[in-house]
Image (spheres, rainbow, N blue to C red):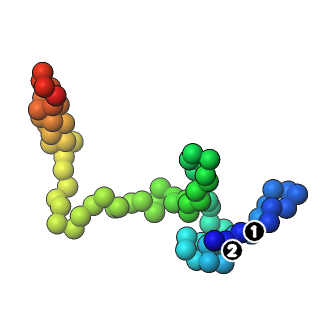
Amino acid sequence: MYESTVTVKGQTTLPRDVRAALGLTSGDKLRYMILDGEVRILKACSVKELRGILSKSSQKPVSLDAMDEAIAAGATDSVGPDK
C-alpha cells in the first residue's frame, strides 16, 4: 500500500511505484473514477493512441453496407417471444 500527503492546494505526489505501474511520465494526464467510495486512477489515453486498437491483421476491412446488413440480421435474430 502506498500513501502520499495532500498539500493545502490539493496537490500530491504519486509514489514512484504507482507512476511506474501506470507507465506515467511528466506531462501525462490522469483520469479519476469514483466507484463505491473508492477512487481509481487511470492513465488517460488520447484518441490518437486508440487508433487500430480493435483491428486484427487477419481481418479485412468491412464496408458500411456490410455492417448495416449484420446489424439488421442481428436485430431480427434477437426479436421473438422468448428473447
Q: Residue at x 15, y 36 (%)?
A: 74
Instruction: Determine the secondary structure under disc 2.
Output: loop
Of residue 35 and residue 14, the one placed in the foreground of this image is: 35
Q: Which mark is drawn over residue 15? A: 2
For the question of whether residue 65 can be seen, the reply is no
The residue at which mark 1 appears reads as 4
| Amino acid type at image mark 2 | Pro
Residue 50 in the image, given as x and y percentages of width and height: 42, 59
Residue 23 in the image, given as x and y percentages of width and height: 55, 74
Quarter of the view holding residue 66 = top left
Q: Residue at x 77, y 64 (%)?
A: 12
For the question of whether residue 76 can be seen, the reply is yes
Asked whether, in this view, residue 56 is left or right of residue 39, the answer is left
Residue 19 in the image, given as x and y percentages of width and height: 62, 73
Q: Are marks 2 and 1 in contact (CB under 8 Å)?
A: yes
Asked whether, in this view, residue 77 is left or right of residue 43, the answer is left
Quarter of the view holding residue 51 = bottom left
**Residue 76 versus residue 27 in the image, above or below:** above
| Amino acid type at image mark 1 | Ser
Q: How many marks?
A: 2
